[in-house]
Amino acid sequence: MKFRKIIRDRLNRDQVYASTKYWDELAETGYGTSGTLLYTNKHINAIFHDVESKIVHGWAGDVAGLRILDIGCGAGRYCREFASLGARVHGVDFSPKSIEVAKKLTSQNNVSYSVGSIYDLEAAEPYDLILCSRVLAVACKDARDVQTCLVKVHAALKPGGRAIFVEPTHRSFMRRILKLNFAEFLDTLRGAGFDVVDKKCAEFYPGRMLLAYVQLPQPTTQRLFNAGEWIARHLPATTDQKFVLVRRRPTR
């Protein structure tokens, strides 16, 4: 029954994922003690976490003393990680229950949270670094929507400030809400006033459903994931997650 619901939700992403009710329910039932959204296969959770964290933290570098905004922070995992490295962090998410979970899991005093949408984003003081993970792919349907959101992100960054986008942007059988391929997404970023500094692709999407929702032994999970990443290196269009590091173009 659970797998049937997952399929049904994915086939109706644009209605289901745009609702705070969906994410509120996940926040109450789907987060572990680490505040990470958990798939059925616990081993793939660890693999995804490791792959994504290495890219995000590798690009972020030394964040001590920086002001960081995490848009779509969920249960605040990256907020707590950045805060532990000396950053001042604010997390925002449109799911009230996710923010409740984030606050419960956070003990640092250099982290704050608020409920809000990327469409309503405003910053009283610009940030050095912004993380936007899996927000545009849920909140936007096309390049025009992405452009609207990027204007908000651009305004919240210092001139020369950096942003990291983690977005499952592609056209595939997975029926993503955002109807953009990776090249179009990059063009939209550039058109919004960002210079693309670096980009990476990860997580072979044809194997994602098997690895995420079928409990497999750890060695089998790792081997299948590695095989998928080998294919993805040769066919990057088959990757689910696109990582992009950008810099706000200085105002002339």
Image: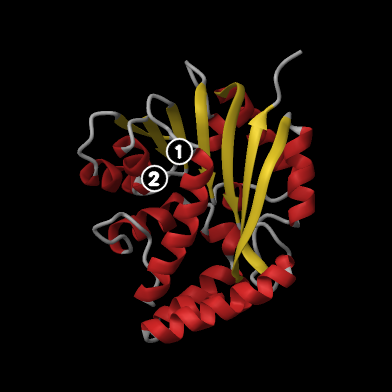
- Whether 138 is drawn above or below 247: the answer is below
Q: Are marks 2 and 1 in contact (CB under 8 Å)?
A: yes
* Circle 1 Cα neighbour tier, 10 Å, few/some/many (<14 / 14–19 / ≥20): many
Question: Could you say where residue 65 lies in the image, as x and y percent from the top left?
Answer: 38, 24
Whether residue 190 appears in this view of the structure is yes
Cα separation, mark 2 vs mark 1, equals 8 Å
Whether residue 180 appears in this view of the structure is no
Question: Hey, what amino acid is under mark 2?
Answer: Tyr
The answer to which quarter of the image holds residue 107 is top left
The answer to which quarter of the image holds residue 174 is bottom right
The residue located at (45%, 53%) in the rendering is 53
Q: Nearer the viewer, mark 2 or mark 1?
A: 2
Question: Could you say where residue 91 lies in the image, as x and y percent from the top left?
Answer: 40, 36
Which label sits on residue 78? Answer: 2
* Circle 2 Cα neighbour tier, 10 Å, few/some/many (<14 / 14–19 / ≥20): many
Extreme residue in the top direction: 252
- Whether 125 is drawn above or below 143: the answer is above
Answer with mark 2 or mark 1, whichever residue precedes in sequence.
Answer: 1
Question: Could you say where residue 40 lies in the image, as x and y percent from the top left?
Answer: 38, 76
Left or right of 200, for residue 144: right
Pointer 1 residue: 70
Question: Hey, what amino acid is under mark 1?
Answer: Asp
